[in-house]
Amino acid sequence: MLEGRFITLGVTGGIAAYKAADLASKLAGQGAAVHVIMTRSAGEFVRPLTFEALTGNTVNSDLFVSSPGLKMPHIDLSGQADLLVVAPATANILGKLAHGIADDLLTTTLLASTCPVLLCPAMNVHMYANKAVQENIVKLTEFGYHFVEPEVGRVACGHFGRGRLAGTGAIMRAITVLLQSPGDMKGLTVVVTAGGTREPIDPVRYISNHSSGKMGYALAEAASSRGARVILVSAPTALPQPPGVEPVPVETAREMHSAVMRYYPGADIVIKAAAVADYRCERQAADKIKKTGEKMTLELVRNPDILAELGAGKREGVTLVGFAAETSQLEKNAREKLSGKNLDLLVANDVTVPGAGFGSDTNIVKLFFAGGRVEALPEMDKLAVAHKILDAVMTVRKTNK
Ligand code: CTP
């Protein structure tokens, strides 16, 4: 899959440096030309020979020493690269990069690069939570660097929390997305909604649904990797922030409504993957409701239908995409929602089918186009489904021109 791609892999000095060997091996195994740059501290944890054996290429670590085939290491290793990956990325490298410091081969290569750069932080839990580190990550995200968030777990120093280098699988997935990016959504602003809204009953309880947010997050990630500016209006989920997107966290349907309306005037595409509660409690109790009789009744009132409102006042040039999670009569319900809400595209799935339901990493969807065409997709990873949906959106936009 990565045949012929030139990947520069920066390895910095953390205990997770040994895991970079697995990553280098997987990248080389998929046909990429992997050129490793190690910082001086990385050399304290792993030996260059490990990477040289796995990649077949000389490891570079000195700014002033060229290895065979490279005239100026920092210029060649940035200029020839299709992608630069730093794994693990320590707090130190993030700090240097955020402040434009270039004092060794890796930092000069990073500053000289024009290709996408993927940073995979790994460090002690408290270091990762440190305000300076978090501010540097925000700054680097704004600069356009891509991230694979560290995992939550036990780190080498014994602490538990977020800081462990993301798994090789997650890093490989991010690499594939970045290298496959067709860049066809450059200049477009996409608003994506995700997750299941929460409608409060009292200060400790709420009404919600089984939406995990995975489909919406995959769409946000895919659109961002294709060059779009992505605003992700998300109800609470357990998912890490996709690289490069602007997060707008909300809880209730009404909060989602006002967030979507705020960003709609600047949007070219709105994709409503969120599972929005159709009803909310008429009154939210100020105090926790105590149990009394055998039965209790909650009085519910309708929430605004965000997508229907957008459809009713649709601007020229805007593409509206809706979702329908159904348990029966998929085609009939899908067509009704498509025309009833004045959409360009409706993505429907039968949530009772294994591999297509809430929380699943895969999805099986049917795309219903405004013109009447229907395209059934096989079971696919949600990121692959997201790219298919975006392909369909771009086709619709071309034909509507
Ligand atoms: N939607 C919305 N605002 C709502 C409800 C739904 O924007 N208040 C959007 C969803 O994000 C999704 C699509 O509309 O894209 C779903 O259509 P809808 O008819 O509301 O689906 P359900 O809520 O499942 O409707 P029903 O319960 O009638 O099947």
Image (cartoon, rainbow, N blue to C red):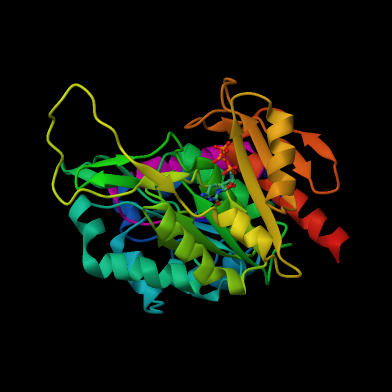
Identify the image quadrant of residue 129.
bottom left
Residue 25, how many percent across, how many down? Answer: 53, 38
Residue 1 in the image: above or below residue 380: below
- Where's ligand 1: which quadrant? top right
Residue 357 in the image: above or below residue 249: above
- From this viewpoint, is residue 311 visible? yes
- Number of disc labels: 0
Residue 230, how many percent across, how many down? Answer: 56, 63
Q: Is residue 400 left or right of residue 235?
A: right
Q: Is residue 299 left or right of residue 246?
A: left
- Name the residue at 46% across, 51% down: 303
Q: In this view of the protein, which residue sits in the foreground, 205 or 317?
A: 205
Q: Is residue 18 magenta?
A: yes
Can you say which quadrant of the picture contains the N terminus?
top right
Q: In this view of the protein, which residue sits in the foreground, 189 or 148?
A: 189
Residue 12, how many percent across, how many down? Answer: 37, 57
- Name the residue at 70% across, 63% down: 185
- Name the residue at 50% across, 43% down: 275
- From this viewpoint, is residue 105 visible? no
Q: In this view of the protein, which residue sits in the foreground, 362 or 195?
A: 195
Residue 258, how many percent across, how many down? Answer: 46, 65
Q: Residue furthest bottom?
A: 100
Can you say which quadrant of the picture contains the C terminus?
bottom right
Identify the image quadrant of residue 368.
top right
Q: Is residue 310 left or right of residue 263?
A: right
Please provide the residue range marked out in magenta. 11-36
Residue 79 in the image: above or below residue 156: below
Residue 353 in the image: above or below residue 211: above
- Name the residue at 62% across, 54% down: 308
